[in-house]
Image: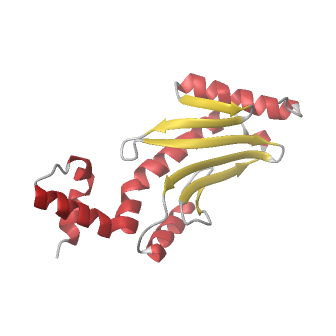
Amino acid sequence: MTYQTAELADAAEVIRAVVAEGGLSAEEPEPGRFVVELPGEKRLKTACWLIVGKQGLSIEAFVVRKPDENHEQVYRWLLSHNARMFGVAWSVAASGDIFLTGRWPLAAVTAADIDRVLGSVLQNADDSFNTLLELGFGSSIRREWAWRTSRGESRANLAAFEAFIERTAD
């Protein structure tokens, strides 16, 4: 595929340069379509799509699947955080899965802003991950904790939720 305009080609080149300079793992399955892997701490990695198109740049990152419970509380939490974010906002797919999404004009595709929006995606996905799990999957977390405890199984990968378990214990 060839780019229809120099503006499309330039935007794609900016993204390639930011990814390379940042030492990020990324794929470009088609020209102008990037999947950048953002390494986190709470959420070990977040795949962020950057898609250069005629109408602008689309940004999309899956964060968590449809909550099992407390939908209204989860969605209220998401909406209350949207105004504080740079370049992306929380969105909910028709399936109920939660994403960070953004739409930018191609003129806004600068190295500084791509770096900043990737940082925003990483920070928001990573910082909110455990909170979203607690709000939307708290019953499952508590059941898993109890099951592992009763069997003497390791709870190492649930350690981040120990305070949550203690807070919500009856």
**Picture coordinates of residue 62 (x, y %)?**
54, 51
Residue 164 in view: no
**Picture coordinates of residue 164 (x, y %)?**
25, 63
Residue positioned 41% across, 73% down in the render: 69
Residue positioned 21% across, 47% down in the render: 156
Residue positioned 72% across, 38% down in the render: 109
Q: Name the foreground residue: 53 vs 82.
A: 53
- Left or right: where does residue 29 sit relative to residue 147? right
Residue positioned 53% across, 61% down in the render: 97
**Picture coordinates of residue 6 (x, y %)?**
86, 30
| Residue furthest front in the image | 151
Q: Is residue 119 above or below residue 160?
A: above
Q: Is residue 48 above or below residue 25?
A: below
Q: Name the foreground residue: 63 vs 89.
A: 63
The mark total stands at 0
Q: Is residue 137 above or below residue 24?
A: below
Q: Is residue 119 above or below residue 62?
A: above
Position of the N terminus, as image quadrant, is top right
